[in-house]
Amino acid sequence: MLDITGLSVAYGGLRALSGVSLLVEEGQFVTVVGPNGAGKSTLFKAISGIVRPEAGGIRFAGEDLLARPAAARAHLGIAHVPEGRQVFKNLTVRENIEMGAYPEAGRQRWAETLERIHSLFPILAQRESQLAGTLSGGEQQMLAIARGLASAPRLLMLDEPSMGLAPAVADMIFDRISQIHREAGLTILLVEQRVAEALELADRGYVLETGRIVLEGPYQTLLSDDRVRRSYLGIGEED
Amino acid sequence: MDALILLENTLNACVAGLVIGCIYGLMCVGLSLIFGIMRVVNFAQGDLLMLGAYAAFYLVVGWGVLAFLGPNTAPFVAAVLAGPIIFALGWVLHRFLLARVSGLRTAGSLDEGHFGQLIVTLGVALILQNGGQILFGSTPRAVTTPLSSSAWLIEIGIGDTTIFLNKARLIACLLSIAAVIGLWLLLDRTRLGRALRAAADNPTAATYMGIDVDRAHRIAFALGSGVTAIAGGLVATYLSFTPFMGLDFVVIMYAGVVLGGMGSLLGAFWGGVTIGFVQQFSALALPPQLQNAAIFVVFLLIVVLRPQGLFGRSADRA
């Protein structure tokens, strides 16, 4: 469904991604893990069209994404839940979700998705007419995910949904994400620093370090890889 | 007797302040869209108002296209038509100049493009003022209507205290209120309005939602230009003007927007109304050249006492 080949992105002279290839198939849950500054967010921004790659290709559902302007990509069925949530602070919770449903697909399935969102995150129904800027971090994260779901996407991209959240809240967010994937069969691409949880959810995983994919495979393979265990899971150091 | 005269003067200042204030409110709302909501510094706002006044002038007097409507109706129809005309101009201005220093292009930069906007709009203001002088001449113009020299008299039943309602100003006031309500409904109730607010609130996230942010900013800029131009057309019905009229009004507009609270459209309207009040009340006690000084005293007081503005909603918009 999403097929990235040889993607390179540079900011000024600084190379953020070099030759990244990545494949997400329909219905899969794919995770990209890696340390801070590895280029995970840049990868998402390139998919969404906020940064322009200098080389490589991105195809989504058979279409050449790079030929499409950024604002057109949401309409193809890509929902980007950005790092740091980026909710519309001066809009109400309800209006935020409505903005998510800006693409045609979201409007058509509005009633159905809204009900689903409220069953996943009941707190958002309670806070409906509150300004999004007044929500707590966890609630803003739920809203950001809800806003992504509201577009009735074919691919949901989540950028560090656990960032800055208390562990219990982050666990709850991971539960919901896994529920969304299980129940709706939604294709998900997740970027995370919390490697263990993120890999556990995924069908496939990629390890991104300083702009390069250093390891990829199904999650069992990654979890049993020595490098992953040592660098990200903090186990196996005594070997 | 003195008490009655004082009462009459006070009541009349109140009414005049409210009426003028609504027209100020309308021009403030135009700037509020551009500066308060989209966060674009626009020094040419006063000159867009001036162009609105001249658009009305040419429609009614200069070319006389609307003269057939008669002197009681034509000036007001012209004022409303100045809206779409200057909307188009605002669209072009944004497309070729402001888009380069605002929107997504500057969203992440340190000054959010304010320096660029300052220079560009100051330049546009100078071109419009001096170009206006070449094209329109420096003779003061007016879109005269017999209504501006007649008034409805309301006797309130205390002695012979009478309230004077200038007909032209009252109609202008009512049209202003209608325009503000229309704009507010557009922003609050429609899909386009929500998209404009989202694009202003967080341009990057708005792009992720599939909103064409540049286009949204262009529409907002053009709307803000058009709304202020309508106010300019309305001002023209009771005040004579030259191509430099914008200088007086740009001060009122910025004060009104900041008074009302940066992110709030209706706040900007009330900011404008407040300024109308202060101006008319200061006329009771102060010589006319100190009226603007009075506006600034009130402005400073509010900035000191309530920095988020009278109707500011959230801290990060103050």
Image (cartoon, rainbow, N blue to C red):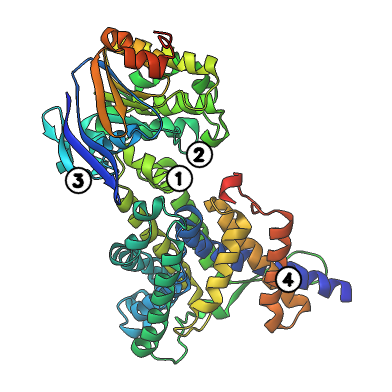
> Where on the picture, by quarter, is residue A194?
top left
Residue B27 image position (x, y, % from top left):
50, 65
Q: Which mark is residue A54?
A: 3
Spatial separation of the CA atoms under disc 2 and disc 3: 33 Å
At 62% across and 62% down in the image, what residue appears? B273
Q: Let me know if residue A169 appears in the view.
A: yes
Which chain is indicated by disc 4?
B
Task: Tell me, yes or no, whether the two marked residues, 4 and 1, touch with CB atoms within 8 Å.
Answer: no
Task: Tell me, yes or no, whether the two marked residues, 2 and 1, touch with CB atoms within 8 Å.
Answer: yes
Query: Few, some or many C-alpha atoms within 10 Å of disc 3 (few <14, some 14-19, many ≥20)?
Result: some
Task: Tell me, yes or no, whether the two marked residues, 4 and 3, touch with CB atoms within 8 Å.
Answer: no
Residue bearing the label numbered 2: A89
Toward the front, the furthest residue is A239
Residue B130 image position (x, y, % from top left):
40, 86
Which chain is indicated by disc 1?
B
Q: Which mark is residue B201?
A: 1
Residue bearing the label numbered 4: B281
